[in-house]
């Protein structure tokens, strides 16, 4: 059988065909720091670090993407928010920069060229593209206009906004959409192959379906249609089955799936329209044995792999710092052992 | 007297559709005292809604709004410093080293809606939390987290509280604990619940334990 490079492998599965083996995305944002022997804050301070870390992780674990994403509050920093660094976890957002709903009237989207953190990510993407060419997909990341307000306003105020001020909600979505489209397209211009559209608030875990259908769905349709490259929606561990029909109509090509849902059920619901990415439980991975890792990988491949349209990954889009290198290697070895097509039913089930 | 099951069903429908008027009407027609309504109606209904969220049948925003509606009504009926609130050992709720406050907000609403008086410590760093636990003589501390790194800091919190000799029951909750059912044991907590409403039964049990220790 033909051996594919990572780009061919991923494109084949996104076309709902079987490549040589199940593609594997190791969405590790922080482990590159360990590769380079430095702390998390220092690692994220330079594009060269993140690019080198991503390249080393790919070489070590033989996975199928380069991840340009640093951390979630990167965008909120551009909006005037605070980023808080930790020694043992991803940077977190501090106090929301928007303190009252009325401030939305005066809010303007930040200019990309003024945002040091965003420029650093663009530099990372350019370096990754220079180093890898077209051999491997490079993933850029945006927060959806519909989910960014959790960091802009705080969750409670955002829920109040949705309930009580539809006028200001529409204004905020319009501002956020302009920013999101510009940010996504800048990443594509810098070398990203595709954009991961993080939209956890869309999940029925967070909002009732009817509420999403009346609000965030239109935002997703409009935003995704303006992003000049392929997109994958990620609900960041939230459930998806209740809105699968809407996701199929949103224009997204792939979907990050939660460990809370059965991969076989999600695959069936996606029905050849959306590829699925997932769904190893990153939080539990912290204490898996190597045998458990192998079993979990086999199970995921058995449930999601047949017929393509499947990429093995964690369920959140960010593997915790506490997951050991040895465990990541066990996951990688398992994909390379059990993920070759054609999948042997007896072998993987 | 209206049958409890009918009351529960009507209230659940009212809360999930964010109907404050219907919630108030159901209370008035129940013939129950405020604290009786909190214990016999709010508590089981919020627990049912929490269970539905855990099973993916309702959304977090509905859990949040349900708690707020109940809390708001009970606050009207029972002022926070009034004599009818339960008088358990001092209970506090805090978010540890994180700015994501929604989980704590839901927890406060649910506990207040079921008649508990709560010290809301808000967002806290580890040392400031230890100080407040000491100064306010907290016996039951509920800690909400969103990030795994914050959840793991609970282990240090436990060690600090133990080393200072504070006899505090520690209850943890939030996403990391939902996704890893053994994490609460790893960090040395006394209990966890996947839902805020599940914390009510835990608080009730721990209250009894603390009261037994005080005898």
Image: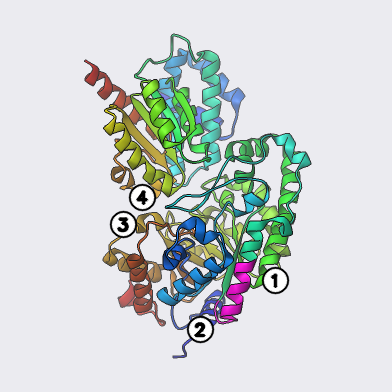
The residue that label 4 is drawn on is B180
Depth check: give the residue in front, A9 or A125. A125
The mark lying in front, picked from 3 and 4, is 3
Check residue B23 for magenta coloring.
Answer: no
The residue that label 3 is drawn on is A287
Residue A62 placement: quadrant: bottom left
Marks 3 and 2 on same chain: yes
Question: x, y percentage for residue A77?
Answer: 63, 50
Q: Are marks 3 and 4 in contact (CB under 8 Å)?
A: yes
Depth check: give the residue in front, B192 or A254. B192
For label 3, the SS is loop
The residue that label 1 is drawn on is A189
Q: Quadrant of the N terminus of chain B?
A: top left
Disc 3 is attached to a residue of which chain? A
Question: x, y percentage for residue A40?
Answer: 47, 57
**Dot 4: few (<14), some (14–19), or many (≥20) neighbours within 10 Å?**
some
Residue A273 vs A204, above or below: the answer is: below
């Amino acid at each position: 059988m033909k051996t594919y490079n990572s780009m061919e492998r991923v494109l084949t599965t996104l076309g709902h065909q079987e490549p040589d083996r199940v593609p594997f995305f190791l969405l590790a944002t922080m482990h590159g720091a360990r590769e380079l022997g430095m702390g998390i804050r220092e690692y994220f301070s330079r594009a060269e670090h993140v690019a080198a870390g991503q390249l080393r992780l790919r070489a070590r674990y033989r996975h199928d993407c380069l991840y340009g994403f640093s951390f979630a509050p990167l965008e909120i920093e551009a909006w005037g928010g605070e980023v808080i660094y930790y020694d043992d976890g991803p940077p977190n957002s501090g106090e929301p920069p928007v303190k009252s709903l009325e401030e939305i009237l005066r809010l303007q989207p930040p200019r990309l060229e003024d945002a040091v953190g965003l420029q650093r990510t663009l530099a990372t993407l350019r370096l990754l593209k220079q180093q890898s060419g077209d051999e491997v997909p490079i993933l850029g990341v945006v927060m959806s206009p519909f989910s960014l307000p959790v960091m802009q306003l705080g969750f409670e105020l955002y829920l109040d906004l949705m309930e009580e001020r539809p006028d200001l909600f529409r204004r905020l979505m319009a501002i956020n959409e302009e920013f999101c489209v510009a940010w996504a397209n800048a990443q594509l211009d810098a070398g990203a192959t595709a954009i991961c559209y993080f939209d956890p608030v869309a999940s029925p875990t967070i909002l009732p379906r009817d509420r999403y259908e009346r609000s965030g769905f239109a935002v997703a349709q409009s935003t995704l249609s303006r992003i000049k490259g392929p997109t994958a929606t990620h609900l960041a561990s939230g459930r998806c089955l209740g809105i699968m029909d809407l996701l199929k109509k949103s224009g997204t090509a792939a979907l990050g799936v939660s460990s809370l849902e059965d991969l076989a059920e999600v695959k069936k619901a996606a029905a050849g329209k959306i590829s699925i990415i997932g769904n190893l439980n990153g939080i539990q991975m912290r204490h898996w044995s190597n045998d458990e890792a192998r079993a979990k990988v086999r199970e995921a491949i058995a449930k999601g792999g047949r017929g393509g349209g499947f990429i093995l990954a964690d369920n959140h889009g960010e593997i915790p710092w506490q997951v050991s290198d040895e465990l990541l290697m066990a996951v990688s070895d398992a994909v390379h052992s059990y993920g070759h097509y054609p999948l042997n039913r007896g072998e993987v089930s | 007297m209206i049958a409890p099951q009918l009351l529960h069903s009507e209230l659940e429908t009212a809360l999930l559709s964010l109907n404050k008027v219907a919630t108030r009407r159901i209370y008035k027609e129940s013939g129950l005292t405020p604290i009786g309504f909190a214990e016999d109606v709010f508590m089981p209904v919020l627990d049912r809604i929490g269970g539905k969220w855990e099973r993916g049948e309702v959304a977090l925003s509905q859990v949040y709004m349900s708690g707020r509606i109940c809390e708001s009504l009970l606050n009207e009926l029972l002022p926070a410093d009034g004599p009818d609130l339960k008088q358990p050992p001092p209970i506090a709720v805090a978010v540890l080293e994180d700015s994501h406050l929604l989980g704590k907000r839901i927890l406060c609403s649910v506990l207040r809606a079921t008649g508990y008086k709560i010290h809301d410590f808000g967002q806290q760093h580890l040392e400031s939390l230890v100080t407040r636990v000491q100064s306010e003589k907290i016996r039951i501390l509920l800690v909400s987290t969103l990030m795994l790194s914050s959840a793991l800091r609970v282990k240090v919190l436990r060690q600090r509280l133990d080393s200072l000799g504070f006899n505090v029951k520690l209850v943890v909750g939030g996403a990391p604990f939902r996704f890893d059912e053994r994490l609460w044991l790893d960090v040395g907590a006394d209990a966890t619940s996947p839902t805020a409403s599940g914390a009510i039964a835990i608080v009730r049990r721990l209250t009894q334990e603390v009261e037994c220790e005080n005898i």
